[in-house]
Amino acid sequence: MSYAIEAKDVSVRYKNFTAIDQVSFQLESGKIHGLLGRNGAGKTSLLSVLSAFRKTDTGNLIIDGEDPFENPRIMQDTIFIFDQHKDLEYSYDKVGETLKEMAYFRPNFDETLALQLAEKFKLPLNKKVNQLSKGKKSAFQAIIGLASRAPLTIFDEAYLGMDAPTRETFYNEILNDQEKHPRTIIFSTHLVSETDYLFDEVLMIHNGKVLLQDTNEQVISKGFSITGSLEQVDDFTKELEVLNSQLLGGTKSVMVYGELSEQQKNAANQAGLDIGPLSLHDLFVHLTKEEKE
Ligand SMILES: Nc1ncnc2c1ncn2[C@@H]1O[C@H](COP(=O)(O)OP(=O)(O)OP(=O)(O)O)[C@@H](O)[C@H]1O
């Protein structure tokens, strides 16, 4: 199974508004891809074409070698979990029965896993789906997403309504099952600080454009905090991309994004500057900051 994705000049438009603007990227199969973007960045719009819900307005999208739109094979192999709480209001069947019935619709559905997860998420199997609380409805959908073991599994802010311990269970179960049954997972979020450990690769979008795409490791390796005396920090960072800076008395601390050579790191040490790492959260917050914020 090789659910690699290739997007070339893909746009998504709503009448005159361009939500995704000629983006190109490749997503490797069998990996967990973090799709990061602020509110309105275009995450759901992009996922709507990746999940074959709608056709791209420009460009080419190839999933597992084919155009996914109206493609029964790719659609069967894709699961798109998003906030469907309104639809679930019309689900009058019991949780346990609904999970068991999923096997009819999803060829790889693992009923045993679904029931184990229902126990972990403390889902009452005898309750009707529409009677579940908001967080439990999200857990119910997350279980379907995981137990379907779809070659292309898409979670669009699928944790909405879950409390913090439940979200952690969800994240850990993604990692557990992915280790045993690798698939291509796209996980969209702006809760970067609590999800960063999930991602093999990161696709950051902003105002409908790709801001960066790389392995999580590579992205992190380009973020640094540099702290020291005001003059030394200013001198050292004059050629670097400074994301943010803070001044406390005569001490300045800046966040920079870019490669630092060993020579530059040695020079910083000699100048008495402290160099530290940045988190994916820090990078996300500062790389997507608008000028007036
Ligand atoms: N049906 C629509 N008609 C017009 N504009 C839309 C429509 N759906 C989305 N948009 C616009 O497209 C842009 C991207 O929206 P989208 O929902 O894809 O963002 P998002 O990154 O998923 O945001 P959030 O994190 O807030 O869910 C926004 O400016 C939004 O207002």
Image: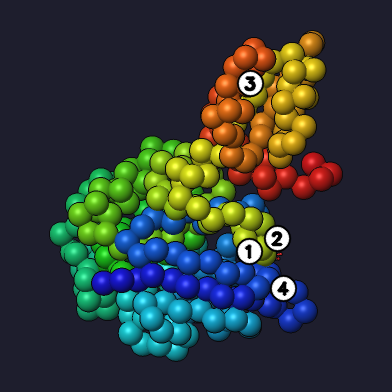
Q: CA distance from mark 3 to mark 1?
A: 39 Å
12 or 276, nearer to the observer: 276
Q: Please tell me the numbered disc located at residue 207.
A: 2
Q: Secondary structure at mark 4?
A: strand
Is the residue under label 2 in contact with that under label 1 (CB below 8 Å)?
yes
Residues at circles 2 and 3 in contact by the CB criterion of under 8 Å: no
In terms of sequence position, does the residue under pointer 1 or pointer 4 come before the other? 4
Residue 15: image location, x then y, percent: 74, 81
Q: Is residue 17 above or below residue 132?
A: below
Precedes in sequence: disc 4 or disc 3: 4
For mark 1, what is the residue? 42
Q: Does the beta carbon at disc 1 come under 8 Å from ligand 1?
A: yes
Q: Amino acid type of disc 1?
A: Gly
Check disc 2 and give the amino acid type.
Answer: Asn
Q: Which residue is mark 3?
A: 268
Give the quadrant of the C terminus: top right
Circle 4 residue: 18
Q: Residues within 10 Å of mark 3 (few under 14, many from 20)?
A: many
Identity of the residue furthest to the front in this view: 263
Q: Are marks 3 and 1 in contact (CB under 8 Å)?
A: no
Q: Is residue 280 above or below residue 55?
A: above
Q: Are marks 4 and 2 in contact (CB under 8 Å)?
A: no
In primary-sequence order, the first of circles 3 and 1 is 1
